[in-house]
Image: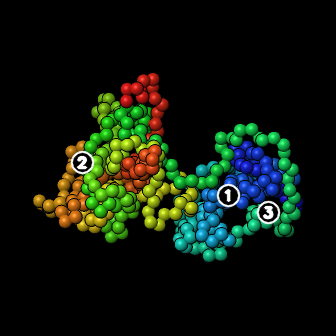
Amino acid sequence: MVVEVGYAQAWDPESRTAWRPLSAGEARERDAAGLPYVVVYRTAGREAPLEVRLVSWRDHHVGLWVYDDQGRRTNDLDMRLLDDPARLFHRYAVAWRYPGPETAEFDPKCPRIILDLFPDGRGLRKEEPRGYSTVAGLTDEQRWMDRPAFGEWPLLSAQVHGLTEPPVFEAAEVSEGDGGEAPAGCWRAPRPAQPGRIGELFRPGVRVTDGYHPEQTVLAPRRVGTLRVPSGLLAVACPDSADDGPAITVPVPPGEYVLDEARVEYGYHCEWRNAHVETTAPTAVRVLLSETPAASWEMALGPDDDLRIFIENQIAGFTTDGAAGCFADAGSFRSLLSLFERGLIHGEPDLDGYEDLDDGSMFMHRTWDTATGGELMVFATTGDGTYPVWLGRSAAGELVSVVVLVEGMPEILPERDGDRAGA
């Protein structure tokens, strides 16, 4: 079988077409520079490609999308270049098994197998939509592949397409022109979860929606108290993690900082009262290190987090199964959590070093270590799971705030005329 090999700067998955075709030499230059490009494999008489390879070495990523005769993606393989430049790690893979030619691409009811693998040997094999998961159980040879040199990649989907003989590769013709403006949905390398406009949650008057209530209005932040961090290391974790240590630690100048809560107000129809009700709800908690506004946000990482293996929208943070998180002085972390357990769980009366701050919209508890001066503040989340910790930095790169969203990032609604002027 003759397989035509073409190169381009990008791939549009909506139209299944390449954008800005490249010669092999131009693609080789982009490969050497680490810039994104794609490789498209086609055969005569078949509208859909056999496979598309999506390369971005600067993002440590090589993707592979395999298509069937109907133009549906059947396999999605995400490979990563890590510490060994000669090998690629099979980080993530999805294989769809369409029941028939009429089944739509990515139909939620379509059976699919997902492999979620990690370089340390961990991994899960998931069967969807059944929701069945098992340990992946793959060998080291199945998790890694040798990295081919440019121009020497095999047709990795040959077995999927039932090819028994090695294909003969031919270079595709390169069309003239720049291709115009790139389609909005062009492929890009996977990236971790993005912060959104977190600072707007602390600006009174901003309108947001959580998807359930169509409009909510941001109130002025409510000051909960202060937090002393004499060790110069801020811990963010679940208060049940005393045995494991804090999930996230953030270096800060030793000192005492304001801890406040972002809130929204909104109205809704209460069915059991059969009346319109006005209420408030928290959206985030923040340790405020400086009054300088945050110009950018980044996700805090734990000691074992490696951005090179993050898949699309992956998060890092602290995990809770008790719907709670905490900010604390890392130097006194274990003693502060011990006081929290004695005060809340065991209910020790008149315990020195523990305080219930149930005077506002959030569940709040504070403990303090008299020996070190370190403090801890426990806050409620809206459920279990993993919560990212967002670091706000000034335009000069200075850390100015540490934020946890207690219920995900709401959508920021467009400003009305005069909103900014009246803020």
Q: Residue at x 35, y 34 (%)?
A: 204
Instruction: Return the residue at label 1.
Output: 34
Query: Does residue 69 appear anywhere in the picture?
Result: no
Pointer 1 local density, CA inside 10 Å: few below 14, some 14–19, many at least 20: some
Q: Residue at x 65, y 43 (%)?
A: 185
Q: Residue at x 14, y 61 (%)?
A: 351
Rendered image: mark on residue 225: 2
Q: CA distance from mark 1 to mark 3?
A: 15 Å
- Seen from this angle, which residue lies furthest top? 417
The reply to whether the C-beta atoms of the residues labelled 1 and 3 are less than 8 Å apart is no
Numbered disc 3: secondary structure: loop
Closest to the observer, 322 or 333 = 333
Judge whether 240 appears above or below 69 on screen. Answer: below
Q: Residue at x 52, y 63 (%)?
A: 306
What's the residue type where badge 2 is placed?
Gly
Give the mark toward the camera: 1 or 3: 1
Pointer 2 local density, CA inside 10 Å: few below 14, some 14–19, many at least 20: some
Q: CA distance from mark 1 to mark 2?
A: 48 Å
What's the residue type where badge 3 is placed?
Gly
Position in image of residue 13 (x %, y %):
70, 47
The reply to whether the C-beta atoms of the residues labelled 1 and 2 are less than 8 Å apart is no
Query: Does residue 83 appear anywhere in the picture?
Result: yes
Numbered disc 2: secondary structure: strand
Mark nearer the N terminus (3 vs 2): 3
What's the residue type where badge 1 is placed?
Gly
Q: Quadrant of residue 135?
A: bottom right
Closest to the observer, 389 or 217 = 389
